Amino acid sequence: QVQLAEAGGGSVEAGGSLKLSCTASGSTDSIACMAWFRQAPGKEREQVAVIYRTAGSKFYADSVKGRFTVSQDNDKNTMYLEMNRLNPEDTAMYYCASAGSCGGGLLRGSRTWGRGTQVTVSS
C-alpha cells in the first residue's frame, strides 16, 4: 500500500506563490504516476497536473499552464507543485494522488489519495 502526505498549503495574496509537496511512503515502487487535484467549494474535483514517475512526462490543466510547475524527486519519493501568479480562482483544497498505471495524462485504475492541503488566495 501507498500512503501520501501533502504539505505547503496556506494563504497568499493574488499574484503570490506557494509550493506544495506530496511525500509517498509504503510501496512506492508500485507508483507509475502522481498527480495534483484540487476541489473548490461546490465544484467537482479537477486534475491540475500529472507527472509520470519514470519518464518524467508532465501534463497540465489549461487553467494552470504557464503558472504551475509539477516536479518530483524520486530519491525522496516526493512530488512538488510550484504555483505562481496565483489568483482567487485557485483557492481550493489541493490533493495529491498516485496510481500504478497511467496513460494519456491521466491516472488509470485504483488511486491512492492524500488528505489534502488548503490553498487560499485573497484578492
Image (cartoon, rainbow, N blue to C red):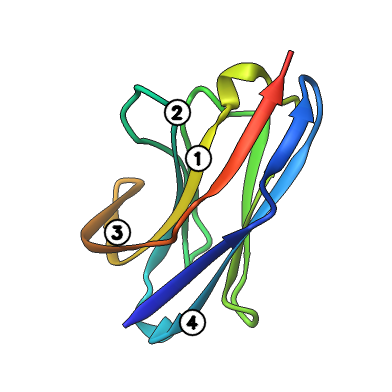
Local packing at callout 4 (Cα closer than 10 Å; few below 14, some 14-19, many 20+) is: some
Q: Nearer the viewer, residue 1 or 65?
A: 1
Q: Nearer the viewer, mark 1 or mark 3?
A: 1
Q: Position of residue 111 (x, y in %)?
A: 27, 62
Q: Earlier in the sequence, mark 2 or mark 3?
A: 2
Residue assigned mark 3:
102
Q: Nearer the viewer, mark 2 or mark 3?
A: 2
- Quarter of the image holding residue 6? bottom right
Q: Position of residue 52 (x, y in %)?
A: 45, 61
Marking on residue 19: none
Marking on residue 93: 1
Local packing at callout 1 (Cα closer than 10 Å; few below 14, some 14-19, many 20+) is: some
The residue lying at 49 percent from left, 52 percent from top is 116
The residue lying at 48 percent from left, 82 percent from top is 25
Q: Amino acid at mark 4?
A: Ser
Q: Nearer the viewer, mark 4 or mark 3?
A: 4
The residue lying at 46 percent from left, 50 percent from top is 95
Residue 62 drawn above or below residue 95? above
Residue assigned mark 4:
25
Q: Secondary structure at mark 1?
A: strand
Left or right relative to 101: residue 51: right
Left or right relative to 77: residue 49: left
Q: Secondary structure at mark 4?
A: strand
Q: Amino acid at mark 1?
A: Met
Q: Are marks 1 and 2 in contact (CB under 8 Å)?
A: yes
Q: Is residue 83 visible?
A: no
Local packing at callout 3 (Cα closer than 10 Å; few below 14, some 14-19, many 20+) is: some
Q: Amino acid at mark 3?
A: Cys
- Quarter of the image holding residue 64? top right
Q: Amino acid at mark 2?
A: Ala
